[in-house]
């Protein structure tokens, strides 16, 4: 896996030479913009709020990784899963490096005839065995999960 991240702070995208925007180009050929939060005290260090923060993309990646696993596990188990979403709330350390210290994930899974125990097992399998993103983040963060199953 590879990714190239380039600073776009030359003002090409924002008109501001102090921009803290970055463009990530992934090995699979996709691009992702990232930006810093504006800094009123030191504008030269802040972003322009044009894109997600880098740590937001880490959190989103963890959510995508685990949701992918849950859907795949349910589908492989011949479950009639229709939708799956996960809302993540995270806390970070107050000092540098401001790593995630707590992450809570709430899954909402809809389908026909989905057993609560089957969904719970899929979430646990993702977090215990398959989701490399959440397993990696669990080195610094306490990760908790809740879920609900909605019949459609």
Image (cartoon, rainbow, N blue to C red):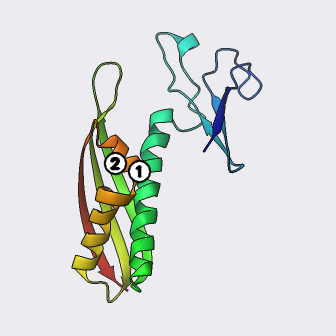
| x and y percentages locating residue 68 in the rendered image | 46, 64
Which label is found at residue 100? Answer: none
User: Tag 1's secondary structure?
Assistant: helix
Q: Nearer the viewer, residue 27 or 84?
A: 27
Residue 86 in which image quadrant: bottom left
Q: Is residue 57 left or right of residue 144?
A: right
Residue shown at 26%/71% (left/top)?
A: 121
Q: Nearer the viewer, residue 66 or 51?
A: 66
Residue shown at 40%/73% (left/top)?
A: 73
**Mark 1 highlights which residue?**
132
Residue shown at 23%/78% (left/top)?
A: 116
Q: Are marks 1 and 2 in contact (CB under 8 Å)?
A: yes
Rendered-image quadrant of the N terminus: top right
Q: Is residue 3 left or right of residue 69?
A: right
Number of other residues with Cα within 10 Å of mark 1, as a class: few under 14, some 14 to 19, many 20 or more: some
Number of other residues with Cα within 10 Å of mark 2, as a class: few under 14, some 14 to 19, many 20 or more: some
| x and y percentages locating residue 95 in the rendered image | 30, 19
**Mark 2 highlights which residue?**
135
Q: Is residue 63 left or right of residue 143?
A: right
């Amino acid at each position: 896996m590879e990714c190239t991240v380039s600073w776009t702070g030359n003002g090409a995208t924002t008109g501001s030479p102090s921009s803290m925007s970055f463009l990530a180009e992934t090995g699979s050929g996709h691009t992702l913009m990232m930006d810093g939060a504006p800094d009123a005290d030191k504008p030269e260090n802040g972003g322009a709020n044009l894109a997600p923060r880098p740590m937001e993309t880490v959190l989103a990646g963890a959510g995508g990784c685990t949701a992918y696993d849950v859907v795949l596990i349910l589908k492989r188990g011949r479950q009639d899963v229709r939708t799956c979403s996960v809302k993540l709330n995270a806390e970070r350390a107050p000092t540098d490096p401001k790593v995630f210290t707590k992450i809570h994930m709430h899954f909402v899974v809809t389908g026909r005839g989905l057993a609560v125990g089957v969904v719970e097992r899929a979430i646990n399998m993702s977090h215990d065995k398959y989701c490399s993103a959440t397993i990696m983040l669990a080195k610094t963060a306490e990760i908790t999960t809740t879920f609900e199953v909605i019949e459609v």
